[in-house]
Image (cartoon, rainbow, N blue to C red):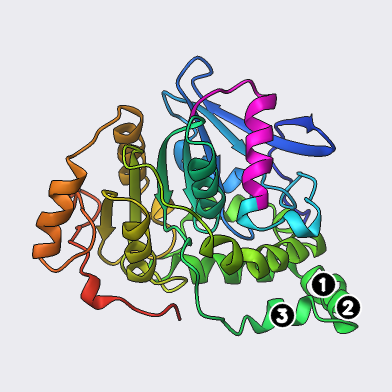
Amino acid sequence: MLVKPLQPTLGTTIHVEDQDVHILDGGNSHGIPVVLLHGCGSLAQEILLPFDNSDFRIIAPDRPGYGLSTPLAPAERGPEGQSFWLERLLASLDLPEVRIVAHSIGSAAALHLAARRPDLVSGLFLISPCCAPVPSKPLIVLRSAVAPVVGPLIRQHVIGRWPAFFLDRGLRSSSFPNPLPSHLSGLPASHVVNPITIRTMADELRAFNRDMERLPDLRGDLPLHVLFGMADRVISPNWHIDWLCRKHPGPIVRLLEGVGHLPHHVVPGVAREMLCDLVEAFKRNGTAACEEHRLAGGCGESTCRSSEETNARPFNSKRRGIPE
């Protein structure tokens, strides 16, 4: 018996210059606007799930080359190029100022926009942010899928033929050590994993280090909230938090014990609480807090509040690790 492939949630497609951008809306249409940016190999439908029933106006686009959005030109697929795409999108939506929630590598474009156009970004909430330049990883499957000659065959006849297998494998790896949340089983595999998204992922990752090495410092009064699972096996929390502390004088960092790369799905209540803090301009004295935390052995300020879902603990820069 053939199983009918899951279909994506359809929102609104707008035309921004020469690009189609697919957008899902959620929350309160009259609320404060919040833009959600998904990570690598994902789509708007995924990151919207924890924030859909929000009091804020939630705007979740498929980033270029993912879901139903048109890819950018190859030279523009890195974080810096995507920040210009995001700037054009905000102008098309007539949004002069927004808060941005970004997951994983989606954080890189958000940081570039905040640094280049601080007037447009009134706050950042970064979830498991992949933002610091990183040592090279093998990424055997992805490298094979974009290699000359064999790459098109692998994309079309291997990855493209069994998208559900590769999506499930990627989600379980990201969720580890936590069980895969059941609501993620409804994602449309063929729209998450296909030849276009594989090519986009490769180009985005190829430009990542170059673009992030030239990110300027962020303005000190920018509200910057960061959520990380300390059991993340996709990226090293310490590595990226250390780097963020060098770019911003006082990020508010919350670390969750026993949580992997998908804290917004594993403990969605914590993510929603932190978004509320950001929108309400919840701030601490960044300079004093950073100095206090350095004396405790950490580089960045941390809210470290306990929650019903999980425990939090301070970040210690001495435990900095190289990404696996």
Q: Is residue 52 visible?
A: yes
Residue 163 percent across, percent down from the top left: 73, 66
Numbered range of the magenta stretch: 81-98
Residue displayed at 32% across by 37% down: 221
As measured in the structure, the alpha-carbon distance from the residue carrying label 2 to the one carrying label 3 is 13 Å
Q: Residues within 10 Å of mark 3 (few under 14, many from 20)?
A: some
Element type at marker 2? helix
In the image, what residue type sits under mark 1? Arg
Residue denoted by label 2: 153
In the image, what residue type sits under mark 2? Leu
Return the disc, 3 or 1, that comes first in the chain's sequence.
3
As measured in the structure, the alpha-carbon distance from the residue carrying label 3 to the one carrying label 1 is 11 Å
In the image, what residue type sits under mark 3? Arg
Q: Establish if 241 lies above or below 68.
A: below
Residue displayed at 33% across by 45% down: 225
Residue 318 percent across, percent down from the top left: 22, 76
Q: Residues within 10 Å of mark 1 (few under 14, many from 20)?
A: many
Are the residues tagged 2 and 1 within 8 Å (C-beta)? yes
Task: Tell me which corner region of the image, top left, top right, bottom left or bottom right, holds residue 177.
Answer: bottom left
Q: How many marks?
A: 3
Residue 183 versus residue 234: which sits nearer the camera? 234
In the drawing, what numbered circle is on residue 155? 1
In the drawing, what numbered circle is on residue 143? 3
Residue 56 percent across, percent down from the top left: 44, 25
